[in-house]
Structures are given as structure tokens and as C-alpha cells.
Amino acid sequence: MNIRKMLLASVAIACAAVPASALADTSGKKIALSNNYAGNSWRQAMLTSWEKITGEAVKTGVVAAADAFTTAENQATEQAAQIQNMILQGYDAIVINAASPTALNGAVKEACDAGITVVSFDGIVTEPCAWRIAVDFKEMGRSEVEYLAKRLPQGGNVLEIRGLAGVFVDDAISGGIHEGVAKYPQFKIAGSVHGDWAQDVAQRAVAGILPSLPEIAAVVTQGGDGYGAAQAFAAAKRPTPIIIMGNRQDELAWWKEQKDANGYETMSVSIAPGVSTLAFWVAQQILDGKEVKKDLVVPFLRIDQDNLEANLEKTPKGGVANVEYTLEDAQAVINSAK
Amino acid sequence: MKINLSTDSVRLLIPALSLIVLLCAVFYLQPRAMSYTGLNLLFNLAVPITLATIAQMLIMTVNDLDLSMGAFVSFVACVAATFLPTAPLIGTIILLAAIAAYAVLGVVIHVRQLPSIVVTLGMSFVWGGLAVLILPSPGGQAPVWARWIMTSKPPLMPMAIVASIIIAVITHFIVMRSSFGVLIRGVGGNTRSVERAGWSIISARAGAYALAASFAVLAGIALVGLTTSADANIALRYTLLSIAGVILGGGEFVGGRVSPIGAVIGALTLTLAGSFLSFLRISPDWQIGAQGAILIVVLALRLFLNRLEKREKGR
């Protein structure tokens, strides 16, 4: 009697435990990536990372399919149509890098109503039914000034290179930089130019403003503009300030060159394009039935003096330093949000 | 036996056929699309494009081209997502003022003999700037009634199809049947003879521009009703899409030769072409090219038909 009861109880426990511990619950699920733009090295790396990690996941049977779609033009209306097509195609989850935080909300709502899990990352959407893996761009800007405060306790003049005007990422990073400067008043932003996240534009913009500037102690950037700034300083025959880099290969290569030549020290920070793989794993976890908070935060990828060589080696020419996330990384991000 | 088709029906034939062929291909690739919700998902974003295409068609009727269409629809979307729900009166006044501005543009273009491309390209920056002023960062809230209309579920046919039919019938009536329609098509065909017949070209142009602006306003509101909120760059694509829609639907750049029903079909075809390519799983690198290829095939077919038509006449 007693033994029978115990047996029954253990069977019951086993039955209850099986669904929770089953790993391959999502093996029949299909995930789609809706991407709005593929025209720069960052996005190319993002798509390559997606292909690499999801290809592996499909092969090992974690999910049934993980297809990537990119819109031909970087336009919200086109991406909304793309998302509606994905609903028709019967995907179980849609991972989105959105062209606009709000203009896709109607399509996202349609997807949610159809019972589809929607995870947005990098370019996030505001529709409440979707998950958001956001980048704290403000914090990124602040961290640049914090680094400078450590390097230059006495402060000095700072040149700010901004991104593409009118894009919220530019506003957010710049806002963080200005907050940092307010916290460390020994720094003064002597000038501010738009580098559009492109080396050639940044070089032209910096060369244009340099003659009117006093001595510059440091340059704060948004990524994709550090190398151009360095070239502009060299061309004007002015001493090279501390230029914060943005993980681009040309920037890291220049930094390495300077480091070997004269012990130049700086740091580099940006978002790893592999964040698409983090979004993939988060979507997989949600499909698996995990309880996941709607708002998650991506860690930055920061390169310092000591790990420069290792990162430069891994970065393809013309590419961006990258890191691909694993299921465990995603679980860590999910758990840290709770 | 020879089937006698009027020139207008021949013009409609190619766009209608290409739409049907594409639709069959989409149904074959994705049987799920062959349902009420499926059709709605396929076509609901075509409604604002259709309205913008009609607007562009009206401008093209008087031999002009509007390069500010996308920026104007974006501007309207921003107004619709900010003022219309909170202060309907001010919102309506702004939109009416925008329509009036379009009428003035028509007059200025006519009186000063300016090329419409230059004027509207310039205006596109004005509309874009105003849109950013009204909505500096993406957001806003669609008016409840716009949302209700765009998500409504009429019996028998999905909203997108019903809306397309209504738009086609109304504009067909305005452009092909009403005396105003004849007048503006006449302006496009032969301005001087219309003028000699005692009509005011200025008021015809102003009327065509104002009517086009009204349709563009409807496009902006419909777009916001679908997306729930706006963005200053939300509809920039509509400039080229609307021109392509008119041409695809059998319209021409000059001569007042337009077809409202064709324009609606053209807009639907363009929307469907995008879905078709994404169902085909063509790699994103090739998609722009493939979309262009579809356009070229349809236009080549039309050119071919035009040739046949001319040869028939020559005989």
C-alpha cells in the first residue's frame, strides 16, 4: 500500500516534470527575422551571425526553420507588409529589427492577435504585446565620458561626433554624452559635428571644424567615425587626442598601429551585431514557454587596451567586432531582467 | 470574327491580367492567403497606396508630376496621429489648409509656367520639415474612427477589397464621367484648345491639385488607421510607388491619358508583387532587382500592346 502510493506519487511527479524539462519543445516551431536594412557592415554582420547560429539550431532540431527577410528599401510601410506576409506564412515567432518604433505597431498587433510571438531588437517597436531587446544607447554615451574622466582627471575640451541627424539612436547616444559631461564638469564640449556613422563623412566634418577649435583633449564618437576623425587630426597636423572608437575593423586596426608605435591608449564600445542571435534565443525561449519580461537590455561589446589584439584578429576586414550569443547568454539576460 | 475592344479596355487588360496572374501565383505559393483574413493581410496596406496613387494620377492628368506625394502623405499621417484625436477642429483646419496650399501650388505652377517637378520637389522638403515639427520623434495615436474603419470586418469581402472597389468606382465617376473630369483630362491632352473653348485653365489646375490633395489626405489617415501611430518618414516610399502604380495601371506621363480603375489595379499589383517575392523566398539581395523585373515585364507588355494598337490604326 505504502509502496504503491509512493510509486503513484513518483509517476505523478515524473509526468508533471516532463513537459518542463523537455528541451526540444520548439522543434516544430518556425521563426522569421524581419530586417529593415542591410546596407552597411554592421547589418551584414548581423545577418551573417543570424545565419550561422540559426543554421546550427535548425540542424540540431531546436527549431524547424529560421528564415531571414530584408526589405528592399528601408521603409516602415514595406516592413509592415513584410510582417503581414510572415503572418500568412505561418511563422510561430517573428524577430524584428524595425524601421520605425511606432509605424509597425499595426502589423505587430495583427501578428500578436494571430498568436505569434514578436520579439524586437536594436530597432525596437513600442506595441505593448511585443518583446523588446533594447540597447541602452544613453548608457553607452555616458560610459564614454566616464572612461575619459578616469583617463583625464583634469578634464579638457571634447569634440563630439554625432551620427545621422533625426535618428533616435543619435539623440540617445548624444543625450548620454551630455549627461556624462554634466556629471564631470571638467569636460567641455568644444564642438559638435555630424559624422553620419561613416568614416569619410566624419573625416570631412572634423576637418571642417578643426581650424576653429582650441586644443582638443578627447573625441567622443558613436561608432564608424573614429578612424575618419583620426585621419582629420593627422591631416591638420594636430596632436592626436583620445578618440573613442566604435568597434569597426578600420578603427581597431588604426588603434593597434598607434598602440604599437607610441603606446596610444583608448577604448572602443558599440553593440555587437550578433544581438540578432540573442533575439533569436529569446524568441525560442518564449516559444518554449519560459516566462520572459517584455523589456530586456542588451550588454555592450566593449574593447579595451588589453583585449584589442584578440578582438581585432576575429574581426573581418571592413567589418565590425562581433560576438554571437548562445542559449545560455540569452537565459542570463532573461534572468537578469527579473 | 474579331472582338472589338475599345482602346480603354485594352489599356485595362494588361494591368488586370497581371494582377490576376500574380494573385494566382500567391495563392499557389501560400494557400493560407486564400481566405478572408489572408486577403485582408495581403491587401490592407494597399489601401493608402491606392489613395496616394489616385492622387498622383489626378496630378498626372494635367501633365504634371508630384514628387512630394510621399512627404505630403507622411505630413498628413503626422497631423492625423497628433491633432485629429485630441483637437479634431484644429486638425481639420490644418488638413484643409494643406489642401488649399495644393490648390495654390497648382495656380503658381500654371501662372509662372514652372516645371511641376521642381516645385513639388521643393515642397517635399517643406512637408517633410512640417512633419518633423509636428512629430519630432515617432509616436502619436491614430484617431479611434480611423482605426475602426481600417480594422472593420465587413461581411463577404475584407475591408481592403471593399475599399479598393469603392475608391475605383468613385474616381472613375469623377475622372471619366463628370464634366470636371473631362475638363482636367482636356487640360492634359490639349491645353490650348480647352482654353480657346472658354474654360479657365487656372481653376481646372487648381481643382485637380486640390482634389489630388484630398485623396492624399485620405491616404495619410488610412495609413495611420493601419499603423496606429505615425513617423515623419512613414510614407516616403509613396512618391515612387504612386507614380509606378499609375503607369502600371495604363496611365501615361503626358496627354491626360489616365485610368482610375487601372491606377487602383496598379497599386494592388505593386503591393502584391512585394508579397509574391517574399513568399518565393528570394534572397533580399535579389529582391529589389526582382521587383524591378516584374515592373519591366508588365511595362514591356504594355508597350507591345501599344505598338499593336498603332499598327491596327495605321492599317
Image: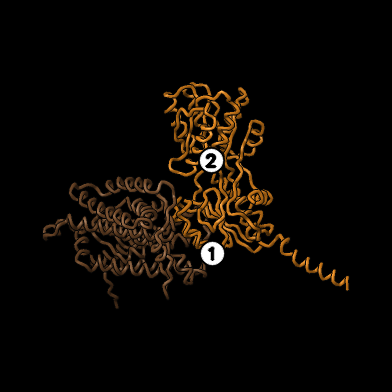
Q: Which chain carries label 1?
A: A
Q: Which chain is orange?
A: A
Q: Which chain carries label 2?
A: A
Image location of residue A141, percent across then percent down:
54, 37
* Front residue (pair A273, B26): A273
Q: How far apart are marks 1 and 2 (CA)?
A: 37 Å
- Mark 1 or 2: in front is 2
Q: In this view, does B288 lie above or below A240?
A: below
Quarter of the image with the N terminus of chain B in it: bottom left
Residue occupying the far bottom of the picture:
B1
Image location of residue A324, percent across then percent down:
64, 46
Q: Is residue B172 above or below residue A105?
A: below
Residue on which disc 1 sits: A89
Q: Is residue B171 left or right of residue A239?
A: left
On the image, which quarter does residue B103 sit in?
A: bottom left
For marks 1 and 2 on the same chain, the one whose residue lies earlier in the sequence: 1
Secondary structure beneath disc 2?
Answer: helix
User: Is any part of residue B239 visible from this angle?
Assistant: no
Residue on which disc 2 sits: A138
User: Is any part of residue A259 visible from this angle?
Assistant: yes
